[in-house]
């Protein structure tokens, strides 16, 4: 916990820490209460973490299988059918199905080429030169995991290759920030600094999010420059899912399906996503289990 002697005491007395409980630090339970009261953030306890770890493991396994299945000639609808089967076999519920308004109609998001996010699986076969993001969000015994990856279909353009690499590196750099006392805003800073240095833009209409007990929980984790000064704390679980564009950052929602978000200029967009746990000493990438 980032607390200095002159900060208000964690106990809520309104006095300075140095005049109140100093040098005592808040216990895990008072820290949890503080985060819930101040930010609406649920710091997860060890039992909850175990359950969420399992949900994230299942998420990663399903995502892995779907990525291996994504080849030229395969439709994204077939990926959705395989996803249904894999969820069923794992005893998992696909979180996107029926989510939101209008209800999302499929079990995964498949976002192709210029689609930024929330693409709906359909009958179009994947073609050489396409690239796509596959996004899997699972519910296992009531707990959530959320992860996505890019897949290239055969040889892709230099522009796509670049945006795919840049978005992966953005996620990697953002994860390296994740440890207690670092601020939420530092995540957006490392992502946007790197994306800009590579001539890419960062989508600011969609953000990462707390997850685990509900699909989307506080806090929001922007991938762009922001000034959210919430310190990361042990037990926080959230996604980082930077959407990086080769051209302009703006996205446009499809007026017919109300879900598919495309780049305004039609240029490619790429995204990678992990669910991250903040530990006492750093972080654990819950959706990157040892097998992968
Ligand atoms: N990872 C995406 C998110 O957190 C998954 C979206 S599923 C959808 O929003 F149903 F909302 F499309
Ligand atoms: Co997400």
Image: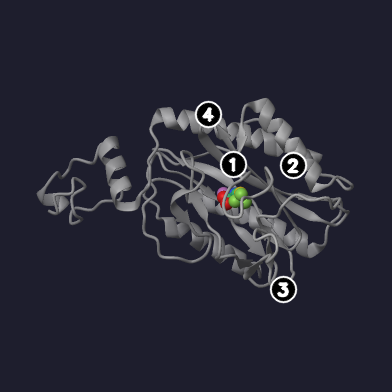
Ligand 1 near label 1 (Cβ, under 8 Å)?
yes
Determine the secondary structure under disc 3.
Answer: loop
Where residue 231 sits: x, y (%)?
Answer: 36, 52
Nearer mark to the viewer, of 3 and 1: 1
Q: Mark 1 — residue?
A: 95
Numbered circle sitting on residue 80: 2
Where residue 189 sits: x, y (%)?
Answer: 49, 63
Q: Earlier in the sequence, mark 2 or mark 3?
A: 2
Instruction: Please report the residue visible at 56 percent of the width from the left and 53 percent of the height from the top.
Output: 173
Q: Mark 4 — residue?
A: 141
Q: Earlier in the sequence, mark 3 or mark 1?
A: 1
From mark 4 to mark 1, how far is it between C-alphas?
12 Å
**Coloring applied to the structure:** one colour
Q: Earlier in the sequence, mark 3 or mark 4?
A: 4
Q: Mark 3 — residue?
A: 265
Ligand 1 near label 3 (Cβ, under 8 Å)?
no
Position of residue 276 in the picture relative to residue 181 (left or right): right
Residue 233, quarter of picture: top left
Q: How many other residues sit within 10 Å of disc 2, few (<14), some (14-19) or many (≥20)?
A: many
Q: Nearer the viewer, residue 192 or 47?
A: 47
From mark 1 to mark 2, how far is it between C-alphas?
13 Å
Q: How many other residues sit within 10 Å of disc 4, few (<14), some (14-19) or many (≥20)?
A: few
Does the image show residue 172? no
Instruction: Please report the residue visible at 32 percent of the width from the left and 46 percent of the height from the top.
Output: 36
Determine the secondary structure under disc 4.
Answer: loop
Numbered circle sitting on residue 220: none
């Amino acid at each position: 916990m980032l607390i200095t002697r002159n900060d208000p005491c964690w106990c809520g007395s309104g006095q300075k820490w140095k005049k109140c409980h100093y040098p005592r630090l808040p216990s895990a339970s008072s820290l949890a209460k503080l985060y819930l009261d101040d930010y609406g953030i649920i710091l997860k306890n060890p039992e909850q973490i175990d359950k969420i770890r399992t949900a994230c493991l299942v998420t990663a396994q399903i995502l892995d299988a779907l990525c291996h299945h994504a080849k030229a000639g395969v439709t994204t609808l077939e990926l959705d059918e395989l996803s249904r089967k894999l969820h069923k076999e794992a005893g998992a519920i696909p979180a996107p199905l029926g989510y939101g308004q209008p209800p999302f109609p499929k079990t995964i998001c498949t976002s192709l080429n210029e689609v930024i996010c929330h693409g709906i699986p359909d009958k179009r076969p994947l073609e050489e030169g396409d690239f796509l993001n596959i996004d899997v969000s699972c519910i296992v015994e009531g707990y959530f995991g959320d992860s996505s990856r890019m897949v290239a279909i055969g040889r892709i353009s230099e522009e796509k290759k670049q945006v795919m690499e840049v978005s992966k590196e953005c996620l990697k750099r953002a994860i390296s920030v994740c440890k207690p006392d670092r601020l939420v805003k530092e995540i957006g800073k490392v992502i946007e600094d790197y994306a800009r240095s590579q001539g890419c833009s960062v989508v600011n209409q969609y953000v990462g999010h707390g997850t685990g007990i509900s699909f989307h929980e506080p806090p929001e984790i922007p991938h762009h420059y922001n000034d959210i000064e919430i310190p990361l704390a042990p037990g926080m679980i959230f996604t980082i899912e930077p959407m990086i564009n080769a051209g302009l950052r703006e996205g446009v929602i499809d007026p017919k399906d109300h879900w598919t978000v495309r780049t305004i200029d039609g240029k490619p967009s790429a995204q990678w996503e992990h669910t991250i746990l903040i530990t006492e000493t750093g972080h654990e990438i819950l959706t990157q289990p040892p097998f992968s």
